[in-house]
Image: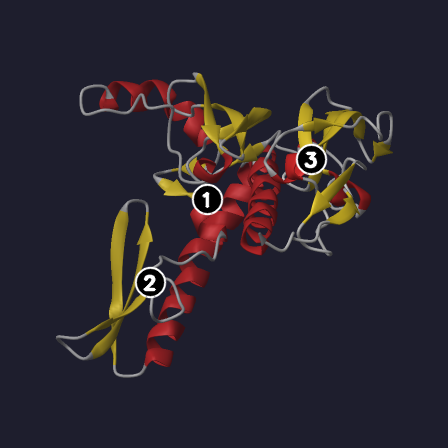
Amino acid sequence: MKEEKKFQRKCKICGKDFFSDHCNTLYCPACRSGTKIIKNEHVGERFGKLTVLSDYSLNSLRYARCKCDCGRIKIVNYKSLKAGLTTSCGCARILDVPNLINEHGVEAIKRTGRKNGKDVYLCKCPRCGKEFEVLQNNFWRKKSCGCISPEKSAENMANGWKNVTAKGLEDGTQIFYLISEEKPKNNTSGTRGVYYNKKSQKWHASICFKRKRIFLGSFFKKEDAIAARKEAEKNIYGKFVEEFKENYPDRWGIIEKSHEKSLEMKNKNRQK
């Protein structure tokens, strides 16, 4: 029986000589089997905020165990370090959250860590004043710490009303809503408060103010409905906002600053 030819090769990971049935084999059996081989050839190297503590080979890949300047330990593919794709444990992406307030009055105090790949914010409830944690992606729709319930709703609203008002709620009208151009997801007209009524086959326009919905009319043309809505915003919202700015300059400053940060945060989330 003819003896099979063996080729002597040198492993590209561990450097050991081995024999293979193929002339183009790059890795020895140990490196291909999933066995972690400690190398420690890059200890002390620094990439951005990361310092290599140890490195090893696994499944034909090189990994580095790094310590970030913030104190966290992170395992990184060594190629990502060399290419400059990874320069921190993730702390470099932390956003400045103080004075960040969502449209419901929930205020982000500081970032406390990460969970499931998301930043965790320590927030203050506008209803009861209690501090609670919430994930970054849930912050914008959070209304309270959870204190609102059918049994406690009236009591909590009474106790926390002043806090809510201080964050932009006046006479039952949310100032954030007035200065925001955000539209409902089911909006088809491109303008808030304008929708098509299939039954009448007309475009209807309405506006909400101080907990009341004001019907502005129905129109055959969408442009006419939009014009009616814009005119109502100018006459109703415009005057109200100007009076609020004049009477409560400090509160308006908080609202304006928070609104700018809200837009900045939403733009960054869309880009991800």
Q: Is residue 223 left or right of residue 261?
A: left
The residue carrying mark 1 is 175
The residue carrying mark 3 is 76
Residue at position x 59%, y 55% in the image = 271
Q: CA distance from mark 2 to mark 3?
A: 50 Å
* Displayed quadrant of residue 253: top right
Q: CA distance from mark 1 to mark 3?
A: 46 Å
Q: Amino acid at mark 3?
A: Val
Cβ–Cβ under 8 Å for marks 2 and 3: no
Residue at position x 67%, y 37% in the image = 31
Q: Is residue 145 above or below residue 84?
A: above
Which residue is outermost to the bottom? 220
Residue 91 horizontal/vertical position (percent): 68, 31
Residue at position x 42%, y 25% in the image = 126
Residue 148 horizontal/vertical position (percent): 28, 25
Dot 1 or dot 3, earlier in sequence: 3
Residue at position x 57%, y 34% in the image = 100
**Disc 1 element:** helix
Circle 1 residues within 10 Å: few <14, some 14–19, many ≥20: many
Dot 2 or dot 1, earlier in sequence: 1
Q: Is residue 79 left or right of residue 137?
A: right
Q: Is residue 154 visible?
A: yes
Q: Is residue 94 visible?
A: no
Name the disc covering residue 127, or none: none
Residue 98 horizontal/vertical position (percent): 62, 29
Residue 145 horizontal/vertical position (percent): 38, 23
> Of residues 18 and 62, which is closer to you in this image?
18
The residue carrying mark 2 is 193
Q: Amino acid at mark 2?
A: Gly
